[in-house]
Image (tube, rainbow, N blue to C red):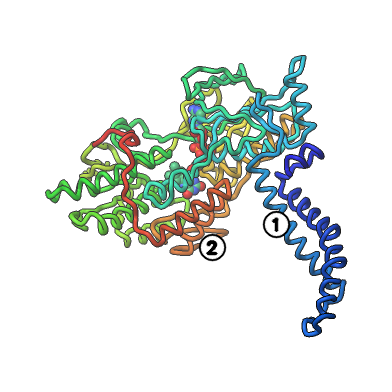
Amino acid sequence: MGVVLYRAFGVSLSRLRNGVLYGLGVGMVVLVAFAIPVSMAVIAPAAAGLVSEDPSMAAPRPEPAVAITDSAISHAIWGVTAGTVATALTRRLGANYRCHRCDIEFSKRPTYAEHVSRMHGSGAPLLRRILVLGGGYAGIGVLRRLQREFEDSVDTSITIVSEDNFFLSTPLLAEMATGHVEPRHISTPIRTFCRRARYYHASVESIDLDGRSVMIRRTVDGKAVEMRYDHLVLALGGQTNYYGNSSVEEHALTIRTLEDALALRNRIITMLEGADQEDGAAEQESMATFVVVGGGFSGVETAGAIHDFVTESAERYYRNIEPSAVRVVLVSAGPILPEIGELGPYAERAMGRRGVEIIKGAKLVEASPHAATLDNGKIIPCMTIVWAGGVRASPVVAALDAEHGAGGRVSVNECLQVAGRPEVHALGDCAHLVNARTGRPYPPTAQNAIRQAAVAAHNVASAVRGRGSQRRFDYASAGSMAMIGRRDGVAVLFGLRLRGVLAWLLWRNYYLSRLPSAEKRLRVAIDWLVDLYVPSDVTRLGNILDRRRRP
Ligand SMILES: Cc1cc2nc3c(=O)[nH]c(=O)nc-3n(C[C@H](O)[C@H](O)[C@H](O)COP(=O)(O)OP(=O)(O)OC[C@H]3O[C@@H](n4cnc5c(N)ncnc54)[C@H](O)[C@@H]3O)c2cc1C
């Protein structure tokens, strides 16, 4: 029906509003054309006949107006439900016009027809090309808004390039590494976001700001392709910053990507398996010791998640491991969770009570397969070190011919434009912007990337349309929160300080709501529900995932 309506009248049922109106309309037509006539012409006389034959079957009959109102309400409910289902089916099956040559779709027939005639007819097409680099919180946020903005525009092309063909909900990585959620449930294919945009699965090799072109390398065959743009959105995120320490780079695991999280999970399980077979106390302790470096969100959340997973698994499955041999050590050069202010010390105490050892004011200076050496001279025998100590911009961004801030992030003004390049906007972890309220750079967080995406999309659209009005990014965080262990968290929201189960629930709800589709939200919610009742799973996935050197 969606396709017929679309083709005949150009009405797209993929919009919920249209679906509901369509359902209501159909419900009312059925009421007027079928339900009322049938009730009056067939059912009422038949009922009267039955009553005249057997008076005991007489029942009080409602007033006609009341009966019609009742019937109208039930038809309206039925219609809205059917309309919503029609919208869902239309979205899934597609009633929109797709140009297979460009791999994009339009929601209106005339727009599609105009696109075909202008792009694939005779004469050179006139296009304004928007190129989005990166498919994380920043890139996808901008993409979704730009698609809505240019849904009916035939002279604007939108392209997105990302080396991962999925959007990753990074705050849930620690939960994934310790088996609370499944990898596919926190990753969403970029193609599911692309209606008006074209996606390239490729890595960005270099960017020529003067020539307005980007060199990409296709993932499938390594072929280099040049892409030209009129407007560029830089959202390439960050990479782990080892601050030049090659021993850490070589021997520590990290937690930034899906692969990292899978490799970490494998390593933890391998160590537990090994420790269970080891009878020497020192060797067992070394295998069962996990050192996490970094007192920010990712370090704290990872240490908390590893601790719960390891202690629970050791108790249940690895009975040869001495409970005292299991250690999780969190090393931080500064205070714990400085982003969360006064609740940092609470997080520290709570983690300490759970059994996480915390070493503050110390830096990791050397990592080896068998130990972590700190700058205070302490040597921790361990076979697993997780480095969550810093972020820097991707090398492509660091190499840009532009001004840079700390960690090679490209400097932008408050409208998120690169200095002297009004056609280039940068945001998220790869952009350096000083917060005028605090005088410090905005931290590399998902919250900032999400907010910046709204501003960047508006500004790019405005530039494309030649309007010139640019919105400023000025964001005062409503708060922040962190999960520090099973059913324990800390949060500061609008000045309100929360901790324990409430903060943990808030954390889970917030990140559940930030998942990009209802399907992923449902899957993660089910994972969490099941996780409440079943013990941890210590399945170790194939060796192929263990990218890092074996200890
Ligand atoms: C473990 C962990 C926990 C975190 N927890 C929190 C939290 O609790 N709260 C919070 O606010 N923030 C948290 N963060 C930070 C948050 O995830 C980032 O700030 C956010 O992801 C930044 O979004 P982005 O789009 O700028 O970059 P990213 O999400 O990193 O996306 C970058 C995109 O660019 C692509 N890309 C990179 N290089 C190339 C290339 N050369 N070619 C093509 N594509 C490329 C990548 O594939 C990716 O799609 C956490 C981060 C981690 C790692």
From the viewer's perspective, tell me whether residue 44 is left or right of residue 397: right
Which mark, by number, is residue 496? 2
Which quarter of the rendered picture does the N terminus lie within?
top right
Which percent across, then down, holds residue 263?
34, 39
Whether residue 484 is situated above or below residue 502 in the rendered picture: above
Tag 1: residue type?
A: Thr
Q: Residue furthest left?
A: 280
Q: Quadrant of residue 540?
A: top left
Q: Residue furthest top?
A: 123
Q: Name the foreground residue: 362 vs 33.
A: 33
Write the residue at 82% across / 79% down.
51
Which percent across, then down, holds residue 92?
63, 43
Which quarter of the rendered picture does the C terminus lie within?
top left
On whether ligand 1 comes within 8 Å of the CB at mark 2, the answer is: no
For disc 1, the marked residue is 81
Q: Residue furthest front?
A: 53
Tag 2: residue type?
A: Leu
Q: Residue furthest bottom?
A: 56
